[in-house]
Amino acid sequence: MDPIRVVLVDDHPVVRRGLRSLLESLPGYTVVGEAADGISAVREVQLTRPDVVLMDIRMPGLDGLEATRAVLSAVPATTVLMVTMLDEDDAVFAAMRVGARGYLLKGADQQEIDRAIRAVAAGEVIFSPGVAQRVISHFSSADAAAAPSEAFPELTPREREVLDLVAAGLRNAMIAERLFLSQKTVANHLSSIFAKLSVDGRHQAIIRARDEGLGRP
């Protein structure tokens, strides 16, 4: 198997030396270039075409976020793994938006760095453990906030399905055909729906259903 070709981007020479030494001590890596700022990073990636770029965020001139955007535009086959001191949600999500495949905090041990590089090189997305937990919590909270409450919880799933088709303008015969039911069964469902919704008939049921978003294509 060919070694993973890596470019190191960080404005601190000590950090770059440390990463180079770490990778050279592990099997399966070749460091093909280094850069101390975003502009140099883009040029280096275009020249060397690495598999993975280890990218800092805070750098003079072009920062790591804009550099990542430019790198991935110039060499789409390259993968970017952020390696930064910034343990902030805004930085993590900004990195995701520009196309980074991973987010690793400086201070990660050798095993974690090795695992992260191999993961992003294989097409996976990876975060430092603490960052990953916050990302999961963020999206879980967002999903919970965005999830609408189900309309008419008093109805059974089948009754809600029937009501949805009624609100879409289908007559009983068409509903029966669509749901593989008899027309009598559809009529029974409608009687139950009208009773549960306290409506006088089909017209009022349609109004209630459409108010709750049912009956739309």
Image: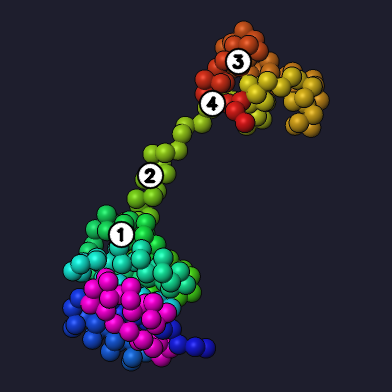
Q: Earlier in the sequence, mark 2 or mark 3?
A: 2
Location of residue 161 in the rendering, given as x and y in whole percent from the top left corner: 65, 29
Measure the C-alpha gap from mark 1 to mark 4: 36 Å
Q: Amino acid at mark 2?
A: Ala
Location of residue 39 in the rendering, given as x and y in whole percent from the top left corner: 27, 71
Q: Earlier in the sequence, mark 1 or mark 4?
A: 1
Does residue 150 show up magenta in the picture? no
Residue occupying image coordinates x 22% and y 64%: 86
Residue occupying image coordinates x 45% and y 69%: 76
Does residue 106 appear to the left or right of 181 in the view shown?
A: left
Q: Which residue is mark 1?
A: 92
Q: Residues within 10 Å of mark 2 (few under 14, many from 20)?
A: few
Q: Which residue is mark 2?
A: 142
Q: Which residue is mark 4?
A: 213
Q: Amino acid at mark 1?
A: Val
Q: Earlier in the sequence, mark 3 or mark 4?
A: 3
Q: Nearer the viewer, mark 2 or mark 1?
A: 1
Q: Amino acid at mark 4?
A: Gly
Q: Nearer the viewer, mark 1 or mark 3?
A: 1
Measure the C-alpha gap from mark 2 to mark 1: 16 Å
Q: Is residue 1 above or below residue 128?
A: below
Q: Which residue is mark 3?
A: 205
Measure the C-alpha gap from mark 3 to mark 4: 12 Å
